[in-house]
Amino acid sequence: MKYLLPILITALFTMGSQAQEDDLLSLLGEEEETVEYVNAAFKTNRVINLHSLESTSAGVLDIKISHRFGTLNRGAYELFGLDNATIRIGGDYGITDQLTIGLGRSSFQKTYDGFVKYKFLRQSTGAKKMPLTAAFFASTALQTMKWQNPDRENYFSSRLYYTFQMIVGRKFSESFSLQLSPTVVHRNLVKTSAESNDVFALAAAGRIKITKRLALNAEYIYVLPDQLLPGFRNSLSVGFDIETGGHVFQLHFTNSTSMIAPGFVAQTVENWGDGGIHFGFNVSRVFTVVKPKFD
Amino acid sequence: MNKIVLSLSLFLLLGTAVQAQKYFTRQGKVSFFSETPVENIEAHNGKATSVVDAESGKMEFAILIKAFQFEKALMQEHFNENYMESSTYPKATFKGQFDNWGSVDLTKDGTYPVDVSGDMTIHGVTQPVKAEGEIVVEGGKVKGHSTFNLTVANYDIEIPSVVRENIAKTVRVDVDVDYQPLDRG
């Protein structure tokens, strides 16, 4: 009797507690925490001209057609710049979710470009907490204009431009992302000895998501002083990302004509102050080339 | 008196031991299919958790929305960002029971048709759901399978006009689960 009563009480309690188990899943105990990567800091892998924190997903081909019209201050005669257009056609491909390669051809100075972008840190929460996303970007551009002085000895290497960039940023919230990109553009040949072959710049870009399918983007590229001749300016661009099913339309205003780094970092001449603003757009269309395997 | 207390204790202890049998999985397969003339979309998730209480016939499911995998990466991103808002509503859950549990004998091999009813919570919205399925008992192993339809609009999932033709109003959901006995240590 002395021993049985406690057993009885225990048994009754065990019964009681089991009768109340209406949350069955809690029986499995704490779930194993998984790593959750933060996605979609930007709607596509470009902010406007700059590369964003995003990569092209593995097996996906992203065809991009980009236009920059003439400047608004050309007036009604040239329909505020719409009579002129500079174009870049290119394609980006995701080899892995972190490694993207791309090729493009710009009408601006008849330039071909190729790039490699590797995302080596991914912002994440959960089992592994990483506050930032970081990527390394390297590109080569080949300018194919006819030589200005065909009579003198011209070198192929004089046509080459290199860009190296770190892209570091964070998606602070669903609606706000910010990134910084220290950049160096190397030009094998410059026009005058007063210009430096290496141009160091710091770029900043951000996004505010207005609705699920509309975002406001802005980017500014600060070129460190005493590297460019007077008359060259820092690039400032503001625009909207509009997303439909498989397309992202980026509509923007920018004072840069070129859509690749050697151009928009080191060869921007127009001035927002006097209406030297280009209307432009990037259209991105993704195609799934290699289908992922499901677990 | 002693005997009464003893037999009552034994009865209760045995009773609890027998009733304790529960089955679970962490690798349940849940897929959905949206079919329209424009395109077919499917997504797969192999990480559903589920527990079945063999005594009461109650069952629960939970699934991480982010673990759904699509063929198209952008579609997966849109699914999470725009439709399911998975950072706000990370999980979908189902709490319910087998309505004809009495006809299922887990100790005997066989295929038992079952009716399931309960509350489905997706995108923060809870709706009553009824589904038909099967419990298959084979060599002591318990498997569950069900196919049912869900109406997207019932869960406050907003589909913009540009893709309205691409996404079905009703999606088919397939559930496939291999249960294991839950040791209660």
Image (cartoon, coloured by chain):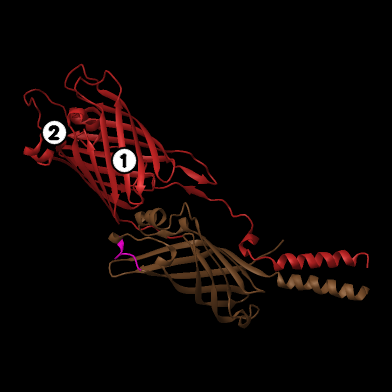
Q: What is the x, y in percent for residue B111? A: 56, 81
Q: What is the x, y in percent for residue A11? A: 80, 67
Relative horizontal placement of residue A293, taking residue A7 as reference (left or right): left
- The subunit letter for the residue under badge 1 reads A
Amino acid found under the numbered disc labelled 2: Asn
Residue at x-position 65% and y-position 69%: B22
Residue at x-position 29% and y-position 61%: B161
Tell me the tag on residue A197: none
- The subunit letter for the residue under badge 2 reads A
Amino acid found under the numbered disc labelled 1: Asn
Work out whether residue B66 or residue A148 is closer to the camera in this orientation and state it: B66
Residue on which disc 1 sits? A217
Residue B78 part of the magenta-drawn span: no
Q: Main secondary structure of the magenta part?
A: loop
Q: Which of marks 2 and 1 is nearer the N terminus?
A: 2
Give the chain coloured brown. Answer: B
**Quadrant housing residue A221:** top left
Residue at x-position 10% and y-position 29%: A147
Q: What element carries label 1?
A: strand
Residue on which disc 2 sits? A73
Q: Can residue B30 be seen in this view?
A: yes
Q: What is the x, y in percent for residue B63? A: 51, 61
Instruction: Tell me the magenta residue range.
Output: B163-168
Relative horizontal placement of residue A180, taking residue A230 as reference (left or right): right
Give the chain coloured red. Answer: A
Labels 2 and 1 touching (C-beta < 8 A): no
Judge whether A262 appears above or below B177 on screen. above
Q: Nearer the viewer, mark 2 or mark 1?
A: 2
